[in-house]
């Protein structure tokens, strides 16, 4: 595999639970230095409030969206337009253009992937822009 340039660590990590998704998002957002772009289920925002508050307080570029408008004391989460073709409720994050999550929540299940590979981050950016209606 070394001759093919395979990475030493996993290039894509599978997300198989809400807890795993929240842990990855909390970790990445907590380490953000420049930007946080997030489309998440509305219910996730109170759970992510602490790290999002830090990002907003640090004056990072923060773009937050959900399937419905949500208000936190320190930030407004905009609603994405309806009619998107996505399995369940979208979960898409791009942090510092360094890491990304592409996933969905369907009832109590969260399924998707996390990666720091450039092609995956580009795909997450396309999904993010498309879901918020600016593609």
Image (cartoon, rainbow, N blue to C red):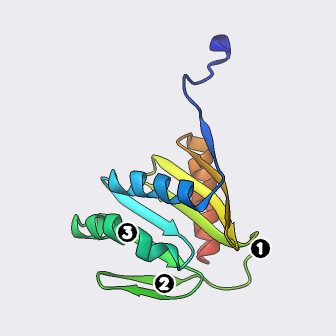
Q: CA distance from mark 2 to mark 3?
A: 12 Å
Describe residue 121's horizontal placement relative to residue 27 as left or right.
right
Neighbours of disc 1 within 10 Å: few (<14), some (14-19), many (20+): few
Give the residue displayed 34% in from the left and 55% down from the top: 30
Closer to the camera, 91 or 20?
A: 20
Which residue corresponds to mark 2?
78
Residue 91: image location, x then y, percent: 60, 66
* The N terminus, quarter of image: top right
Quarter of the image where one finds residue 84:
bottom right
Tell me which residue sits at (30%, 85%) in the image. Answer: 73
Task: Relative to 67, say whether 135 is above or below.
Answer: above
Q: How far apart are labels 1 and 2 at the CA level?
A: 19 Å
- Lateral position of residue 135 relative to residue 62, left or right: right
Pointer 3 residue: 62
Q: Which label's residue is closer to the chain start, 2 or 3?
A: 3
Q: Is residue 3 left or right of residue 77?
A: right
Where 46 sits versus 2, above or below? below
Instruction: Give the SS element for disc 2.
Output: strand
Classed neighbour count for the residue bearing mark 3: other residues with Cα under 10 Å, few (<14), some (14–19), many (≥20): some
- SS category of the residue bearing label 3: strand
What separation in Å lies between label 3 and label 1 (alpha carbons)?
A: 25 Å
Q: Is residue 112 above or below residue 5?
A: below
User: From the image, which quarter does the C terminus lie in?
Assistant: bottom right
Give the labeled residue for mark 1. Answer: 85
Which of the 4 quarters of the picture holds residue 72? bottom left
Q: Residue at x 50, y 72 (%)?
A: 44
22 relative position to 32: left or right: right
| Residue 7 locus on image (x, y percent) | 57, 24
Residue 8 or residue 94, whichever sits in front: 8
């Amino acid at each position: 595999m070394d001759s093919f340039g395979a990475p030493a660590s996993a290039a894509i990590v599978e997300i198989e639970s809400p807890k795993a998704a929240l842990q990855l998002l909390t970790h990445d957002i907590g380490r953000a230095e420049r930007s946080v772009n997030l489309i998440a289920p509305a219910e996730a925002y109170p759970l992510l409030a602490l790290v999002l508050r830090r990002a907003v307080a640090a004056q990072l570029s923060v773009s937050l969206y959900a399937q419905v408008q949500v208000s936190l004391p320190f930030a407004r989460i905009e609603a994405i337009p309806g009619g998107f073709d996505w399995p369940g409720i979208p979960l898409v994050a791009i942090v510092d253009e360094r890491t990304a999550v592409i996933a969905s929540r369907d009832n109590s299940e969260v399924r998707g992937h996390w990666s720091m590979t450039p092609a995956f981050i580009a795909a997450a950016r396309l999904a993010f822009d498309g879901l918020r209606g600016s593609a």
